[in-house]
Image (cartoon, rainbow, N blue to C red):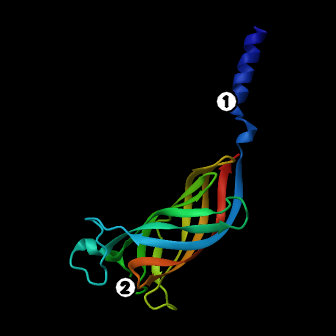
Amino acid sequence: MRLKALAALALAMFVVFPAAALADTDHPVDGSGTVKLRPVIDAANTCNPTAPTQDSDLHCRYQLSGLFTETTGYLGDGHTGGRMFLDYSAVDPVTGCIPTSGIVKFQTVNGFVRTKLAKVAETCPDPNVPGGLTQDFQLKVTSGSDSYFTARSGLIDWTASLATKKTKPGWLFGPSAWQGSIVTID
């Protein structure tokens, strides 16, 4: 009888009090880099907002890439990847800001952190650069892992200043900076 009682107590300890090693830990991150947004043209996203002739001209899909340096040392250096969608059909008539959605992934040699743009994300005209755009929004950490951690949540503030180049029409290039925290299961 004592053996059954001890077994039941041990089982209750694992169910009621999970392992202490699985605590959430908040890790600050702070990085910067360069960003390149390459247009991806398909039937739904023909991306010609300056001279639209069809609805799909107001929808721009971009492939995001670039290198980054993370200064706290938690993530290390790596490259960004992902996609962004700019919806010119819903431009704010007062500010000129464009609703923006997408995914940004921070990839290092050891692993990755995946984020999703907040629902209120916008890309706005840059008042200091003719034809330029600025981004200033939050990224919500959705997943990630490497040799040392499993990411479960977090928020990262993202800023970027983008402009086109004559040699690559339609592409957007510029510096980015970001800071926030990643919550991990340790």
Q: Residue at x 78, y 10 (%)?
A: 2
Residue 15 image point, x, y percent: 67, 30
Residue 62 found in image quarter: bottom left
Residue 153 image point, x, y percent: 60, 54
Residue 182 found in image quarter: bottom right
Q: Which structural element holds mark 2?
A: loop
Q: Residue at x 64, y 51 (%)?
A: 110
Above/below status of 96 relative to 113: below
Above/below status of 79 relative to 11: below
Residue 137 found in image quarter: bottom right
Above/below status of 56 relative to 126: above
Mark 1 belongs to which amino acid? Answer: Val
Residue under pointer 1: 15
Q: Disc 2 and disc 1: Cα gap in Å?
A: 55 Å
Figure quadrant of the N terminus: top right
Residue under pointer 2: 93
Mark 2 belongs to which amino acid? Answer: Pro
Callout 2 crowding tier (Cα within 10 Å): few <14, some 14–19, many ≥20:
few
Q: Which structural element holds mark 1?
A: helix
Residue 89 image point, x, y percent: 31, 76
Residue 113 image point, x, y percent: 58, 56
Q: Residue at x 31, y 74 (%)?
A: 47
